[in-house]
Amino acid sequence: MAVDYTTRDGVAVLTLNNPPVNGLGLSTRAGIVEGIERAQNDPAVKAIVLTGAGKAFSGGADITEFNTPKATQEPTLPTVIEAVEGSAKPVVAAIHSVAMGGGLELALGAHYRVAAAGAQIALPEVKLGILPGAGGTQRLPRAIGLEASLNMIVSGAPVLSEKLADSGLFDEVVANPAELADTALAFARKVGAQAGAHPKVRDRKIEHPNAAGFIQFARNTVVAIAKHFPAPHKCIDAIEAGVNDGFDKGLAFERECFTALVQTPESRALRHAFFGERAASKIPDVPSDTPVRDITQVAVIGAGTMGGGIAMNFINAGIPVTLLETKQEALERGLATIRKNYEASVKKGKLKPEVMEQRLALLSPTLSYDELKQADLIVEAVFEELGVKEQVFRRLDEVAKPGAILASNTSTLDVDRIAAFTKRPQDVVGMHFFSPANVMKLLEVVRGKETAKDVLATVMKLAKKIKKTAVVSGVCDGFIGNRMIEQYIRQALFMLEEGALPAQVDRAIEKFGFAMGPFRMSDLAGNDIGWAIRKRRYLEHPEMHYSKIADRLCEMGRFGQKTGGGWYDYKAGDRTAYPSSVVNDMIGEYSKETNAQRRKISDEEIVERLVFALVNEGAKILEEGIASKASDIDMVYLTGYGFPLHRGGPMLYADTVGLYNVERAIRRYAARPNGDAWQLAPSIAKLAAEGRGFNDRA
Ligand code: 3HC
Ligand code: NAI
């Protein structure tokens, strides 16, 4: 049974017991109703305490049940809350650790609430593309007022229980969580002895001097931040309905919105991202109880663009870092950049100056490998040349203590070859951070042939500590993310040859939801980077067909923003991309020279070719076992490449379109000019034939 029932001195204690977070799945819901009824029928019971076992009061509705028959099977959550609220004997919710979503809604149905300090209180449904569907939009405003509840519901952000001590939500907040149970029991005994009806949140009034104005203000704010998501708007609508039409009508409207939102592609995408993030940390053949190595000292080799950002991640998490360079000036330059980054945060008010100093104090610059002897993890971020990596790894092998993890931040080199420079390849792993490394959430953890399982387990755990989304990739050129983006860029360039212009391609894909199209992005990163990669490709893969149009641009010296011009023109001190007649003429000329028939390319074709190029390569990456699950690929794209969150990543998007349709489109493009770039991944055809998708769970 997912709910335990015990009695103590005239109080029935209902304890939700559905690990890990007491999700309100069908059996838990049924258990609560049963417990409430049992308590009604026991004359010795005068009051009821409702609490949660383990690490939560309740994390809310069981998200895995959404869109399954169980979600709507009685008792539904509204029925459960009605039973709690309708109990003739007073119900006291004893809240600790986490009361979120349906968990908080359940507590709002109780007559009284006692909370332990430190509990995270939230209605985070909006982050899953829905709104609170069991009275949250109606009861929370009645408990804590319109403004505070609107903020909580529209942002979904957690608030600590002690901050809500005077809000009207809690009857008592207990400073010491260990005393919660006794305090709640004593409270229950007290109210159980009181005659008369017990208070219900639904009966309270929402008082606000200018509710309409405030709601309009919230609406204006949300328009700017929730462009692609319907849920925040619906949250406001539901709260407004409760303000204007009263509790019952508000509740009915909220339910209607919930039922509609839970079926939207946006909600599916957000739920996919929620589970995808958690699934990414699970590696199929590395059990979750694999012992991990202690990481209390980190070293970073190279204080350049990446090394500095990587070091910041660790010192931000309180882990001391030794930063090694070959020359004093390089070291000083690196340290100055780190300081400048922190100072910028201090200036914006995001960081206290004393915290900046505490962090900087954790950084020990050095020119000597002797200083690395204590490091538990050493991350190399030196020049991208195998010879330099060899030098560094041979030296690390000599000085690092036994069991130290040796990581490389290489973006293109073979981690197995790097591991082979040492006598301890089992301790070598790739940690591929993204630039700027202190900001970007993504970390590709590159698993070499010999990387030990406990090394992987350690790095995945550490990634959580430094607040990264870590995704494991096998060894291949470009790993997951860059290998896929290469196909995307290839298509973007082919489309220029065939009739499109940079601004059209960017506009189409930005309308789809990408923050930046391929050409604006390339101008920002520097067109010379892609040029260098292509030159290598021409040697390594002469059989591979690339458009040379980007080489032509580089030959004109147009490397992007840093040279004042790339695919677009730029004005000094202005990052706006202005379409360039010089470039557009060059593109026309190039098409002529190569006898390409320029034609009008639709926005739909642009989006399909760019996104399906990602999907097709992603499918191959799965076939080869480079990624272990489709959601890992989606997490890479959502956290590292600006793929629109409301579409859930390329693989989920392909499922939404339907793999049958994806296959047809790829076959169609394969039969056209530049069609040799489309080699359909066999798994797409197979899944399409079986009527399945990459992510059947979402
Ligand atoms: N339903 C189903 N599974 C859930 C869940 C939920 N509501 N909340 C968490 N889980 C699962 C996670 O998937 C994870 O499973 P795994 O171990 O198999 O990967 C496990 O519980 C532990 O989760 P975390 O790793 O996130 O654990 P933390 O301790 O770091 O965080 C938490 C706990 C703060 C509760 C966090 O899990 C969380 O934010 N959960 C989502 C809360 C939420 O959005 N609730 C609203 C649900 S919708 C709702 O209630 C609708 C209602 O209005 C009708
Ligand atoms: P960078 O040129 O900015 O920095 C490299 C630093 O390493 C320089 O400060 C240099 O002095 C130092 N260095 C060189 N040889 C050294 C040695 N033997 N010992 C100690 N320090 C040495 O380069 P960047 O961009 O930081 O790249 C570093 C690594 O990170 C490369 O492997 C690169 O491929 C990878 N990477 C780069 C990304 C980017 O966007 N710049 C993204 C992800 C990975």
Image (cartoon, grey):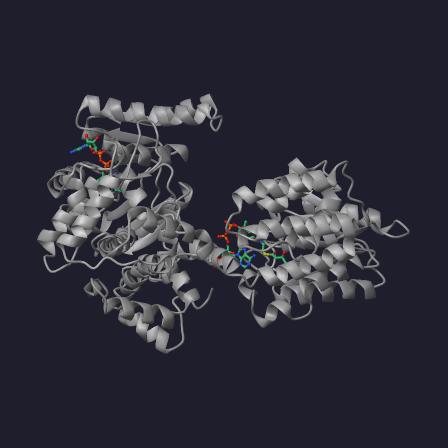
Q: From the viewer's side, name the closer residue of 78 and 670.
A: 670
Q: From the viewer's side, name the closer residue of 346 and 575.
A: 575
| Ligand 2 quadrant in view | top left
> Residue 539 placed where, x, y %?
8, 52
In the rendered image, the vertical position of residue 616 relative to residue 277, given as above or below? below
* Occupied quadrant, residue 666: bottom left
Q: From the viewer's side, name the closer residue of 132 and 676.
A: 676
Residue at 9% across / 57% down in the picture? 542
Please state if 319 lies on the left or on the right of 178 as rendered. left
Please state if 384 lies on the left or on the right of 260 as rendered. left
Q: Is residue 382 visible?
A: yes
In the rendered image, the vertical position of residue 555 relative to residue 504, given as above or below? above
* Occupied quadrant, residue 81: bottom right
> Residue 379 placed where, x, y %?
26, 39
> Residue 61 placed where, x, y %?
60, 59
Residue at 58% across / 53% down in the picture? 231
Q: From the viewer's side, name the closer residue of 595 and 318.
A: 595
